[in-house]
Amino acid sequence: MAASLLVVTSPSLSVSREFESTAISPPAPASLTSSGFGSLVTGKRNSVRGRNSLSWVVRRNGFLGSGVAALRNSAKLSGNSVYSARENSNLAGGFCKASLDALIFDCDGVILESEDLHRRAYNLTFEHFNVKCDSKLVDWDTEFYDVLQNTVGGGKPKMRWYFGKNGWPTSTVFETAPESDEDRSTLIDTLQDWKTDKYKDLISSGAKTRPGVLELMDEARSMGIKLAVCSAATKSSVVFCLTNLLGKERFEQLDCFLAGDDVKNKKPDPLIYKVAAENLGVSPDRCLVIEDSLIGLQAARGAGMRCVISYTSSTSNQDFTGSAARYANLGGISLKELIKLMDTTPAAVL
């Protein structure tokens, strides 16, 4: 069996895939040389985002274990956090023989079962601005909104689609229906801004994350997997939602965060996930996306990423052909299970 290398780093430091050998200083932790891994062979200094950080490379001549368990055991023995591993000379992106570099979450429907909160916020907005199509106050019922939110991604595009189909409305913003692109954009922007504030009020009233989300994020973080959130919603509402639901510390530790304002094209266009892969510095086929809808699945697959579905009551009947797995929620789903999906499910073919 070929010898393998295990790279460990201090919890407060980062690690890079590219290493430049230097003399080791300061000395490696004693726990590494006395933990039974084998002998210390070299020290290497990394440059990550303009900062220097020190890692120790330990040679393991025997078989310590496999996958997540091996890294957990080694981290426990060394007293350090494990961020990347080289197994049989193949870089494993954070895990021995695993192929997961980044875990990417959608927000609405995945982190929070939020669609009815959005629907209520829209209806409060239409009422506040007296938005009427054909002299009838616009009101999106649950059945209609389930179809709408699974057809059109993003808040502004939803209203544009609806008004384009049903006629541009009268309102307190414009007494007559807007005809120019400028006036229509002003109306949409005004409605969306007010709706976002109402949505925040509803979030503040006691919304909670869906089962398993925080546990899975924390497990991925502890194993060195990059974390991202990509949402089609307005940035201010997503930031507010995530800081309230994830907590300020978890939110600030995200390696990438993109909202609908950050990309020109909304889901099901794959652009947001392509940009995320670029920002994370990872290959799309080493990313796993967690979505709740067909729109999200199409966006992830279009970016060349595998996708797991955590469906909601409004998306449970959709055709999720092409997904790596389907769950009612993420409760009880471990990172080890997701890694297995990465290793056994073919990547999307572009």
Image (tube, grey):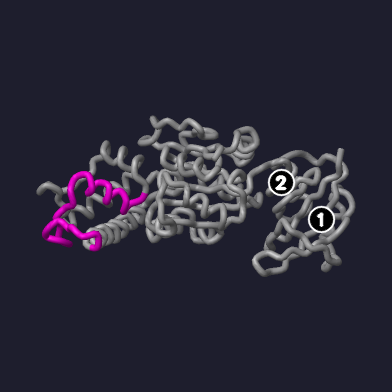
Secondary structure of the residue carrying numbered label 2: loop
Q: Inspect the image, locate mark 1, and give the three-letter code of the amino acid beneath it.
A: Val
Q: Nearer the viewer, mark 1 or mark 2?
A: 2
In the rendered image, residue 115, in percent from the top left (x then y), is placed at 34, 45
The residues colored magenta run 154-182
Q: Name the quadrant containing residue 244.
A: bottom left
Q: Amino acid at mark 2?
A: Ala
User: Which numbered circle lies on residue 21?
Assistant: none
Give the x, y percent position of residue 6.
79, 50
The residue where tag 2 is placed is 92
Against 323, is 61 above or below? below
Q: Looking at the image, tell me whether mark 1 or mark 2 is earlier in sequence order.
A: 1
Nearest the eye: 288 or 314:
288
Q: Which residue is mark 1?
A: 57
Q: Residue at x 65, y 36 (%)?
A: 343
Q: Residue 1: x, y in percent? A: 87, 38
> Residue 85 location, x and y as percent?
74, 49
Q: Is 184 on the left or on the right of 350, as rendered?
A: left
Q: Quadrant of residue 69?
A: top right
